[in-house]
Image (spheres, grey):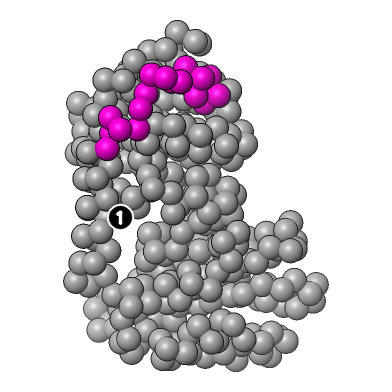
Amino acid sequence: DEGQIETLVQALSKAECPVILSGSGIIWSQAWEELHALVDATGIPFYTTPQGRGVVPEDHECCFPSARSTAFREADLIVVVGTRLNYIVAHLAAPRFSADATIARIDIDVDEIAESPRKLDIPIVADAKTALGQLNKAIEGRIDPSQYEQWRNSLAEKEASKRSAPGSNSLSDAVPIHPLRLCEEVKNFMNRDAILVVDGQEILNYGRQSMPTFAPGHRLNSGPFGTMGVGLPFGLGAKVAKPDTQVIVVHGDGSFGLNSMELDTAVRHNIPLLVVISLNGGWTGDPDKNKPGRELGYTRYDQMAESLGCYSEYVEEPGEIQSSLVR
């Protein structure tokens, strides 16, 4: 509906603190070029659901992952494209999102629009690629990135403060290895177009903001239902689909145990991929054993992998992670 597209353009022209929130619909619609063009043309900060990462490279100047909560809370216009408004995005409800924000939503499913958990100010029933293409044409000469410069600067300051705050631990040399240090080392090892699969609980949370994705469809996780154990199977499927692309699976020890025998599948069918296991001995980590039923013990999955024909290493020092990944 071109009339609704025009209404959205007018809302963008009045907004001071807009954000774009996109999901896997961008990937299914193959609309990443249109979304990237919109972000470039407007300078609007963007966020994605876990299933939609990489549609715009996450080193883009409008990407502020550590300022996500602030952006959602302070945004006066939220443009939602190709994602359900489920618990992953807190149903767009206050207080996580401003109750006064204007909500525009683009979705191909009319039922999703009709049953939206939050009232939509600008509902647009459309394929993401089509609607974004229309929007990009409609904003030409009418929206300038400079009008949101103060908003971007505010989020950039928040991002920097979060990254440098005490406890960030990204460069910690502590032993046992801090999960963020592990994520940092994996990030530094990854090719830019690598396919990254992250599965678990604690490691999933740490990896969410510390390991970026730069290509659409190259970030896989368990989805909105949080189904643990999918990491290794997803990684195998990704490597078969894209045999010339680096595939890395980062597992928690609990989630790895659910489908760990798929290492045998990898060996039998010669499917080369890298699996990194964050071994904390329990569900969510419980070193003081204060949470009954959480203790898993420190299973030597590296020895199990060797018995199945894989190459493996057991790393206890943070300074040895990078060389181990290379080997």
Q: Residue 28 is drawn in which quadrant?
A: top right
| Residue 110 makes an appearance in the image | no
- As helix, strand or loop, the secondary structure at mark 1 comes to helix
In terms of depth relative to the viewer, which is nearer, 286 or 326?
A: 326
Q: Which residue is mark 1?
A: 66
- The percent coordinates of residue 224 (x first, y second) are 46, 48
The extreme top residue here reads: 3
Q: Relative to 23, is 162 on the left or the right? A: left
Quarter-of-image position of residue 271? bottom right
Q: Along the horizontal axis of the image, is 83 left or right of 158?
A: right
At a point 43% along the width and 71% down the height, the residue shown is 183
Q: Which residues are magenta?
A: 131-149
316 or 306, nearer to the observer: 316
- Residue drawn at (80%, 72%), measured in percent from left and top? 269
- Across and down, in percent, residue 11 comes to 32, 19
In the picture shown, does residue 211 fall above or below 309? above
Q: Does residue 3 lie above or below 219 as drawn? A: above
Can you say which quadrant of the picture contains the C terminus?
bottom right
Residue 285 horizontal/vertical position (percent): 34, 76
Residue 303 in view in this figure: yes
